Image: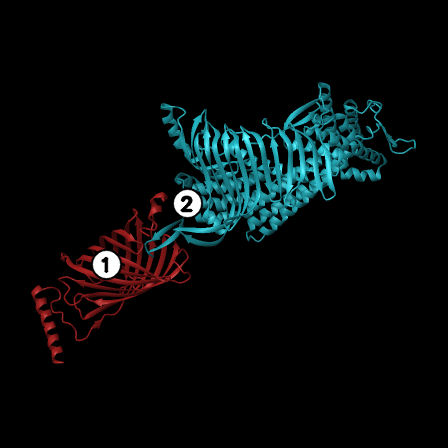
Chain colours: A cyan, B red
Amino acid sequence: MKKPYGGYAYPLLVLLALICSTTAFSQTQLFSGELSAGGFTGTAEYPFKVVDGDSIPEGKFLMYKSNLDALLKEKDSFFSFSGMFNNGHPEGFWKFQFGEFSSNQASQVVGYQYRVNVSGIQHDALGNLKEGKPDGDWTYKISKIENSEVAEELFSSKISFDRGIPQKSFQIENDSITLVGRFLRDGFAHDVWAVYSDVSSEPSENWYFTNGLLERIERSNTSGNVVLEVFDNSAQTYKSKILDEGYLRIVKWYINKQQTELNLEETGMYSLLQQNSQHYQSINTFFNDLGKSEFMPSFKVKLPFYSLDSIETSQVRNITKAYKSASEKSDELLKNPQLEFLARSNEKASYYYTIAKRLQDGFIEPLGVFNSCNDQQMIEFLPRKILIRQIWPNGLPKKQIQLSNEAGPYTSWDLKSSEEYNDQPTNMASIQKMAEYVAKSFDSISEGLSEWLEKAEKQQQFLKLEEQLVEQTQTLENTIDSLQTINRLDIKNALNGILNTKEIILKTYAEMPESDEKLEYGQNTLRCLQNLVELATAVGKLPEQELIIKEAYQDAFWNPFTATIMDEDIKKRITAAHKNIIIPYVLDLIASPVECKDVTQITQLLDDIQKRLLELRDESTKKLERKLRKEQDPQIILELLGIPANPKTAEQ
Amino acid sequence: MKKYYLLRYKAVLLFVVFSLAKGLSQEGNVLPEEAEFKNPVGRVWFNTYGNIRISKRLFWDAQTHFRFEETENTPYIGQIGQIYNRHAIGYIYSKSFNVSLGGVLRINFNTDESSEDRSVVPEWRIWHQYQYAMPLGSTMFYHRIRIEHRWTQGFAENSEYIFRNRWRYMLRAKVPLNNYKFEPGTFYISPEAELIMQSGEPVVASPLEDLRLTTTLGYIVQPRLTVAAGLMYSTGQTLENGGIYKQNWTFRIHMYFSPDFRKVKNKLPSIHFGD
C-alpha cells in the first residue's frame, strides 16, 4: 500500500504532525490523493490517524478510478470502493464495484448529459463487516455487460456470515451450474451440498456432510449414478480444518482409493468453491493492505486425524531428508548427458548408470509420492497403513538389485554396510531405512563415478568456456569491423592494438596444456575480451565525443563588423591539450598494445576524460590555461585537468 | 537660355561678393567654365579597426589609419600623408543597429615637397555614427550615417582653424563568396559607395567633399580577426574652387579585430541581445 504520508503528502503531514503533537496525538487527518491497495491504484479519500508511525484509517472511505478518455479510445479498467473503517478494521456496509469496459464510441445526449453505452465485465461485491469479519449477507456477482445492460450473470455467490463464520445456507453459481449448501451455526458444513446444472432439475453432484464430515459423494453422469464413500466414523480422532485446496486434495486421495480415474478438480463443486475462494481473496488482500481484516470465509470441515507421535515425526523428517538427498543426486546423474555417453562405452559406468536408473524407478519415485503427501501436510489426515500399502502395494523393493544371474563384478548392487529392511513389515521404520539406503547408494554411486564426473564436468566447462570465447571474439571482431569506417589513423592503430591484444591472449590460452590454470586463464581471457569490446566501443565513440567537446567549447558571439552571430572556440588551450596530447596519448597506450589488466582502467580513463572536459567548460580555468601553455607531458596534463590517475598512466 | 545666364551671373556675383567680404584665400578664385578634374593621385591606406567590447551593450571603437600619398619624388606607396586616430564609445542597440560617439585626432603631414610651411598640423573632430545592418539572403547590407564636426587648419604658420560639418552616408554590401554565412574561412566581396557632403562658413561652392566608390575583398581569419584589401576611386570638389574636382585612386588594406577581455561567464548573456 502506498502510505498516505509518503511522497508529496509528506511535508504536509510533517506539519500536521507538529500541530497534532500540541493537541491530541490521535487526532484524525484527511488523506486525499493517489493510493494503491490490493492491486488497485486510484484516487482515495479517507480520514486516518497516526499511531506509532502507522497510519490507521478511521471513518468513511472512498476510492475510485475511471477514465473516460481511455474508455473512448480502447477500454477502461474502473473501480469504486466505499465503506467505513473503525480503528483500522473495516466496519459496516461495504460496496465494491470493478471491472473493465469498452465503448462503441456512439454517444447520446439525454437530459443534459452525454450517455455512452459500455460493454464488458463488472464485479459487484457488497455486504456488512464487523471488526474486519464479514457479518450478515454477502453477495459477490460477476456480470457480463452489453450495451450498458446485464447480458449474462457469470458468477454469483450469496453467503451469510456471523462474525466471519458462514451461516445457514449459501449459494454459489456460475453460468452453467449452481452449488447450494448449508452450514451449522458453528460454521461446519452440514447436510447435502448439491450442484445443479442448467440442464436438469435434479442435482448432478451431492456432497453429504454430517457435522463437517464428508461422508459420501454422489455423482450422476451419463453412465448412471456413482456413490463414493469418503470418510467414515471408524477413526479414533477427528480434526476440524478449513475447506481449502489442501482439504480437497485429501478428499481426492480418499476418492482415488476407490476410483482412480476420477479427477476431482473437474467436478463442479471443486471449481465453484475455488472460484469463490479467489474472489474473496482479492477483497481480503485489499483490506489487508489498508488495515486489519479477516475477510476470508471459514467454511469448516472435519477430517479423520491420525496424529504422528514423536518417533514417527522424526521418521518422517528422516525419510524426507534422505529422499531429497537421493533425488538430487539421481537427477544430477541421470540428467548428465556425459554420463549417458560414458555408460555406452565403459562397463563400470554403464553399471552405475543402470543401478541409478533402477534406484530411481523402484525406490525414489514411490518415496516421492510419500514426500509430496508430507509436503502438502496430508500425512496426518490419511490412514498410514493404507497410504503405505497404496504407495508400496508389493512391499518395499529389495535391497539387493540383481542385474544378471551371472557371477561377476558388475552384476548386482547391494550396500552391505546398510541395514537390511526387507525382513521387517512395511512401516515407517522400514521406509526410513530404505530411504537412507537409497541415499547412501547414491552417495556410493557418485563416489564411484566421481573421477569421470569431475573430468566430464571439466570438459564441459572447457567446452562451454571455449564456446563463449569464440562468441566473444566474434563480437569483438564485429565491433572493430564496424568501426573500421572511421577514417583516422590514430583510431585505426588503437583498434588494431586491441586486435593484437586479443590475438596474444587467445594464443597464450591455446598453447596452455589442459589444467585448472588454463581454465582460470580462459575465464580471465573471456572477461578480457568482454572488456576489450567495451574499450573498442569507447574508442569508436571518440570522434563523436570530440565533436561534443568541440561544440561545448564554442561560444556564439556578435561580430561587430559583419553584424552577424559567429561561433568562436573558447578555452582553446584546454581543447588543444585534449585533442593534440591526451587523446593521442591514450590511443597510443591502446595501440601499444594494451594488457588485459589495464583494459577496464583505460576505458574508464576515456570516460573520465570526456566527463572532466565537459565539466571544465563552465569552470574558471584561467590558471589552468596558463599552466597548460607550455606543457606537453600528457600525464602532467591529466593531473592538471584533475583526471584521476590510473596505474597504467602512472607507470608510463 | 537667358535665364540660365542670369542665374549663372548671379551665382558668380554672389561668390565674388562673398569672397571679397571675407577676404579669404578664395579671393580671385573664379569658377571655371567647365568642371576641371585634377590628375588622380595615388594613395595607400593601412587601416586598423578595433572594436573592443567593454560591457553587454558598450564597445570601444578604436581605429588607426596610416595614409600614404604619392608625390613626385615618392611614387607608388608615397609618403605619409595622415595618421588618423578615430575613437568612440559605441552602443549596441540590437544585432542590426548601433550608434557611436567619439573624437578624432588626425595628424596631417605636409606632402607638398616644395612647401616652406609647417610639416605637421593636427586636425580635430567630434563624430557620431548610426549604423544599420540588414540581411538579404546570405548578403548583408549596411547603411551608415556619419556626422563629423571638424576643425582643420592649413600648414601655413599661424593659420587659423576653420570649422566645417561633414555629412556622410555610406551604403555597403558584404557578399560571402565561398560560404552561405560569415564564419572563419569565408572570403567575401564588399562593394561600397559613400557620399561625403560638407557645410560650414568656409564651404561656399563645394558641398560635395568626396564621393568614394570602393570594392574590397575580405577574408575572415578567425571570428575576431578579419583582413581585407580593396581599391577606392574618389572624387570631390576642392574647397578653394567648387569647379575643380580632385581625384584619387586609393589602395586600402584593412585589419578588423574585436577582442573581448571580459570573463566567459559575463559574455554569455550578451550574445543575442533582445532576440
Where is residue A251? Give x, y as percent: 69, 32
Q: Amino acid at mark 1?
A: Arg
Q: Is residue A95 above or below residue B131?
A: above
Q: Is residue A574 left or right of residue A393?
A: left
Q: Secondary structure at mark 1?
A: strand
Q: Is residue B87 left or right of residue A77?
A: left
Whether tag 2 and tag 1 are in contact, CB under 8 A, the answer is: no
Q: Is A34 in front, or is B85?
A: A34
Q: Name the quadrant containing residue A467.
A: top right
Where is residue A100? Give x, y as percent: 52, 45
Q: Is A291 in front, or is A449?
A: A291
Q: Which residue is mark 1?
A: B146
Q: Which residue is mark 2?
A: A571
Instruction: State the residue lying farthest toward the bottom.
Output: B1
Q: Which residue is painted at 29% across and 53% down in the image?
A: B94
Numbered badge on residue A353: none
Q: Is residue A118 left or right of residue A198?
A: left
Quadrant of the drawing holding the C terminus of chain A = top right
